[in-house]
Image: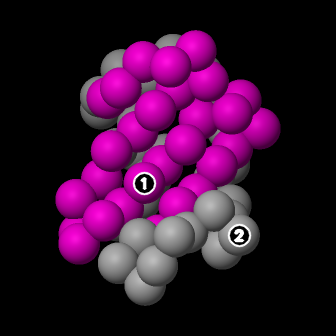
Amino acid sequence: MNLRDEAMKRGVPMIGSPYRRHDLEPNHLYEIYMDEYDNEFIIRRGILTIVSGDGRVY
């Protein structure tokens, strides 16, 4: 899954280069990525949720 492409499709206004944040992952069911605009990309059991830096959920 390309996180940048998916964020563009969902209409996230500013998108950087996502990098993995193992320190934020509560357990093995999660993959969490962040970018330089504080967007958070959360993958849990294959489902992507994007939370933008201003708190909007995509």
Q: Position of residue 28 (x, y in %)?
A: 43, 84
User: Comparing marks 1 and 2, which lies closer to the viewer?
Assistant: 2
Q: Quadrant of the N terminus?
A: bottom left
Q: Which mark is residue 23?
A: 2
Q: Residue furthest right?
A: 36
State the extent of the magenta-drawn residues as a range.
31-58
- 11 to the left or right of 52: left
Residue at 48%, 49% in the rendered image: 41
- 19 to the left or right of 25: right
Tell which circle, 1 or 2, labels the residue nearer the N-terminal end: 2
Vertical comparison of 16 with 25: above or below: above
- 56 to the left or right of 23: left
Badge 2 amino acid: Asp
Q: Position of residue 51 (x, y in %)?
A: 46, 32
Badge 1 amino acid: Ile
Badge 1 is on which residue? 42
Vertical comparison of 40 with 38: above or below: below
Q: Which mark is residue 4?
A: none
**Residue 25, picture quadrant:** bottom right
Q: How is the image coloured?
A: one colour
User: Is residue 41 on the magenta stretch?
Assistant: yes
Q: Position of residue 56 (x, y in %)?
A: 42, 18
**Residue 42, picture quadrant:** bottom left
